[in-house]
Amino acid sequence: MARILITSAIPYINGIKHLGNLVGSQLPADLFARYHRARGDEVMFICATDEHGTPAELAAAKAGKPIAEFCAEMHGVQADIADQFGLSFDHFGRSSSPQNRALTQHFAGRLADAGLIEEVNEKQVYSNADGRFLPDRYIEGTCPNCGYDKARGDQCENCTKQLDPTDLIDPRSAISGSSDLEVRETKHLYLRQSKLKDELDTWINSKSDWPILTTSIAKKWLHDGDGLQDRGITRDLDWGVPVKRGNADWPGMEGKVFYVWFDAPIEYIAATKEWADAKGLDDEAWQRWWRTDKGAEDVRYLQFMGKDNVPFHTLSFPATILGSGEPWKLVDYIKSFNYLNYDGGQFSTSQGRGIFMDQALDILPADYWRWWLLSHAPENSDSEFTWENFQTSVNKDLADVLGNFVSRVTKFCRSKFGEVVPEGGTYGPAETALIDTLTQGLKTYQDCMDRMEVRKASTALRAIWVAGNEYLQAAAPWAVFKEDPDTAAAQIRLSLNLIRFYAVLSAPFIPTASAKMLSAINTLDMEWPTDVAAALEALPAGHEFAVPDVLFAKISDEDRETWQARFSGVRD
Ligand SMILES: Nc1ncnc2c1ncn2[C@@H]1O[C@H](COP(=O)(O)OP(=O)(O)OP(=O)(O)O)[C@@H](O)[C@H]1O
Ligand SMILES: [Zn+2]
């Protein structure tokens, strides 16, 4: 039994996530958490909400709520939707937790002691009307390059030129619109990542099995231009982890907080402590996942995220861990994703474009989405959600192949033998051939899952479903029954057992349908098959079952058109 630690990139708190966010982080993480549990591994699956930073403050202000209240509420909303999507976190924490506050301050203290933090005096734009420093992207003005009048202080969206806020003509606050701005001196802490460059480079180079997307992004940041840059890890904000050096105050840093990207990955660890605390367990319970001096040396740690998160997970967070000089567990494998696009454009939270998790569940159960998203995961390139493709995939894979098999077998059995696994007959060459095909198919499926190839795994699983359908079609028990009911009984006995086999193998992808299949087939036996022939005898003759309701309804052209129209605009 292996021990597998899995973390999903933590979703930002400012709103409900779209399907791109889901397939780029939480959903594939859940797929592998479920798979490893099914294989008998001990799994710790951690996610949380990412709650600090200016966008959260602005979202709270827009909602007319104090920030702490807003975050608590949104955490509840996200937790509930995650649950409805079947995301099987062991703990869904909050980066604003006291555990994360303490641990973030602890890491900062260790890094400072190791000489890896530099105090830098900077000039930054202060808005008198807003009573706060403005992050670069909250300063708007006219682009000196192209004249676009809504250029941001970090970049002009129109001509893509990288800017400094002081480059803007007629700068104003993007929050209040006020042009009463001034440049003030302020002090910030920088993480001296450049000092760890060689160590990080060696570590990345040792990861020859990582997705190219992951290592190429890491290497670009390590080597392009002047190489790995030091990174500001503090901000002049109210909402965040107060800057402290361990337990001690940090002179000159009063009233400042750590930058959200410093504390967010630390929350993976802190959330595991939240889990232990919530269960009334001692520190040993979470440290055995995270401290190599306390039992974590045999843990395999997998991270999941979209491509924009890769630099922080390949460089900044490892710099924090390595720089601390303490025996914290480093990630073993980073599964990163390209982007899922929506119907000819991008998903966008700020513009409300695309399908959001709550809306998706409003129209169809989670498994329809899970199947489509995972079987079209943007692994090797960006991929695109279109309603046509979604309709085709659901109707063909789920309704015609898997759903139809379950329905035909159970209904035929009920009509000829009753709702009980029939006895009599023996298996012949067709059954032996099927078992061979399934044995090969199972191996392929496991290999893909073990290599963490999501799309290929879905293809392999589908091929396993198809094999059963083809067998049933060729065996034709409905025709055989008239002449030779015993042989038909053997065919149906095998097919009913296949339903259990399918439920077990499919559970990581479509857990709800899988549970429905198991409940119809009336068994709690979810043992992962090692020997296909034996697995197909789990339900003996005489075992009772019930014909389930329709597993997957087909999507009609009318539904597709209605939904396409409904989701063509922006959400309010
Ligand atoms: N279109 C997308 N396809 C796949 N993954 C995505 C997509 N957009 C964001 N992600 C990933 O989703 C995860 C959660 O993202 P987060 O909540 O931080 O939102 P975000 O990156 O700000 O996205 P958005 O700006 O669309 O809200 C991250 O790992 C991110 O890389
Ligand atoms: Zn411009």
Image (tube, grey):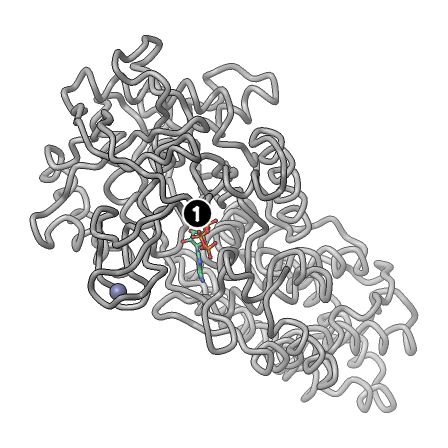
Q: Which of the 4 image quarters holds residue 128?
A: top left
Q: Nearer the viewer, residue 511 or 489?
A: 511
Residue 517 visible in the displayed image: yes
Q: Which of the 4 image quarters holds residue 148?
A: bottom left
Of the 4 image quadrants, the one containing the C terminus is bottom right
Q: Name which residue type carries label 1.
A: Gly
Is residue 169 placed above or below 293 in the rendered structure?
below
Count of labels shown?
1
Q: Position of residue 89 (x, y in %)?
A: 57, 41
* Mark 1, other Cα within 10 Å: few <14 / some 14–19 / many ≥20: some
Residue 317 visible in the displayed image: no
Q: Which of the 4 image quarters holds residue 512?
A: bottom right
Residue farthest toward the left in the current orientation of the protein: 226
Image position of 542 (left or right of 63): right
Q: Nearer the viewer, residue 29 or 404?
A: 29
Q: Position of residue 161 (x, y in %)?
A: 22, 62
Q: Position of residue 426 (x, y in %)?
A: 73, 75
Q: Nearer the viewer, residue 28 or 475?
A: 28
Q: Residue at x 32, y 54 (%)?
A: 141
Q: In terms of image quarters, where does ligand 1 lie?
A: bottom left
Label 1 SS: loop
Instruction: Determine which residue is flagged by label 1.
Output: 177
Q: Residue at x 85, y 78 (%)?
A: 412
Image position of 236 (left or right of 159): right
Q: Position of residue 103 (x, y in %)?
A: 39, 21
Q: Nearer the viewer, residue 217 or 348?
A: 348
Image position of 232 (left or right of 418): left
